[in-house]
Amino acid sequence: MSDQAKAGRRKASSPSAARAPSGLTINVTDGTLIPGSGEKSILSAWNIAFFGALAAIIILPIVSPQPYLEVLAFVPDGLAATFTVTVVSIFFALILGLLAGMGRVAKAKPINLAATVYVEVVRGIPLLVQLFYIYYALGPLLHLKGPASAIAAMSICYGAYMGEIFRAGIQSIPKGQMEAALALGMSRTQALWRIILPQTVKIILPPIGNEFIALLKDSSLVSILAISDLLRRGREYASVSFKFLEAYTIVALIYLIMTLFFSRLVGVMETRLRTHGKRHH
Amino acid sequence: MENGIIRIRDARKSFGRVEALRGIDLEIAKGEVALIIGPSGSGKSTLLRCVNRLEHLDSGEIWVGDDCVTSPRANIRKIREEAGMVFQNFNLFPHLTAGQNIALSPVIVLKEDRTDANARARELLARVGLADKEDSYPEELSGGQQQRVAIARALAMKPKIMLFDEPTSALDPEMIKEVLDVMLDLAKEGMTMMVVSHEMGFARAAADRVVFMDEGRIVESGPPDELFANPREERTRSFLNHIL
């Protein structure tokens, strides 16, 4: 394999570190650990957490069905709301992120500036504040209904993070690729769509998977608004029955099982991309 | 050589405080093969990259045929269609097969029919001796094979001139010949070629002229046999002593 391919692969694991000036980078995220096949300690920690949570959520309702089974029966429509908010938000966040990322690498100054301002503003405001702002302040102004404004807020926030992922992905592609495309007479837009972005996809899929998991967790913030997501359903149950421990235990277990499941999925995907990434058969 | 297909007049270019080009005048006639040699940092690659405007000149003019490359109103995409470029690191598109690498820009830039473009890609692959590699991805090819695909990719745009930026410098010695053979064929067919390279064998076999550059200037130029045997300038002599 050529050096270029090796470099590309090394970058693949950490696009955010692609532009670090020196060799030393420390990658710390608030995301879940992504267990790859090579990392035994993370994998066994994952096994303990995942199967422990699974066992707890099965055994608790069997041992004492009174509150636990009741909670379990009470929250599924909240789970559906959580998923809807997450999936729809990630969809719009991807579109916004692609635009922001392309804007951040654009040659045209105004576009570049607009994208950068968007990213900086959004990243500087806590998600909860953004949710309140769009839900209570802008929502009535723009005639957005409850769930729509919650989804808008989540999309706008995560679009900025996605934008940074797209930017890092685009910038991790060797400069020679753009030059070769331009030298063949392609426009910058053609080169971006035909040459750069297809190569970027493999690099940014794992970080996008991480963002999906982070968004799944952050979607619990919408429970503060009038949306009956998983957390809010748990709270509703608890406030009526006063069984706080039992209700929130089940809610926490469900979140944990979901995020662990998806982080494993992202890990498998990352390994796949690493081993077969260059083949397209 | 008043009607050179490439005409460079007083080309100047700086990168920050480094003057890469300090006033270059050069004309390359239609069908001529010009080899540009010189120590690293002499500005030869920069000069080549200014011809299709991958780099912008600070001052001076470059013309390719009837088009002024350095004019802000230049139709740079048309000029780039007419000027094929081959890079040191091949720069093949890793997500596309050899055939797709070649056929892509004729389809999306020249709006050629896809079937025609694919047929022509096969033709070009056969021409560079890689008829059986149409469906191979770049990573499955050796460096020499990749560079031959890159040459075929540039030829697919039916260029009037070809620019080679150190086409063999990244290759293992045993692969250099296969690339030079393709370039030699191209030279024999009458292609106008501007080649940045230190391949003296290629210079003797195919070059009409060798241009020696140092510190952003052309020190001297002449037919290869003459320049190699009797360099007029001391600077040229000492450089040739190092690489011959």
Image (tube, rainbow, N blue to C red):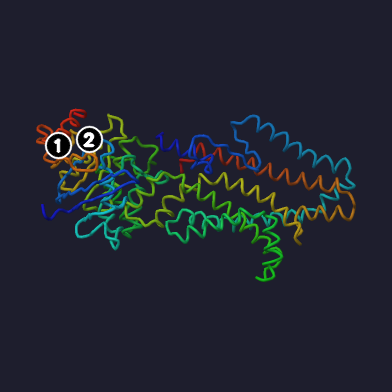
SS at mark 1 in the image: helix
Of residues A135 and A10, the one nearer the viewer is: A135
Quadrant position of residue B169: top left
Of residues B98 and A82, the one nearer the viewer is: A82
Numbered label tally: 2
Instruction: Tell me whether marks 2 and 1 sit on the same chain.
Output: yes
Tag on residue B205?
1
Image location of residue B123, percent across then percent down: 27, 47
Chain of the residue where label 2 is placed in the rendered structure: B
Chain of the residue where label 1 is placed in the rendered structure: B
Looking at the image, residue A45 lies above or below residue A84: above
Looking at the image, residue A115 lies above or below residue A213: below
Residue at left 24%, top 46%? B22
**Classed neighbour count for the residue bearing mark 1: other residues with Cα under 10 Å, few (<14), some (14–19), many (≥20):** few
Instruction: Look at the image and tell me in which quarter the N terminus of chain A lies.
Output: top left
Image location of residue A100, percent across then percent down: 52, 56
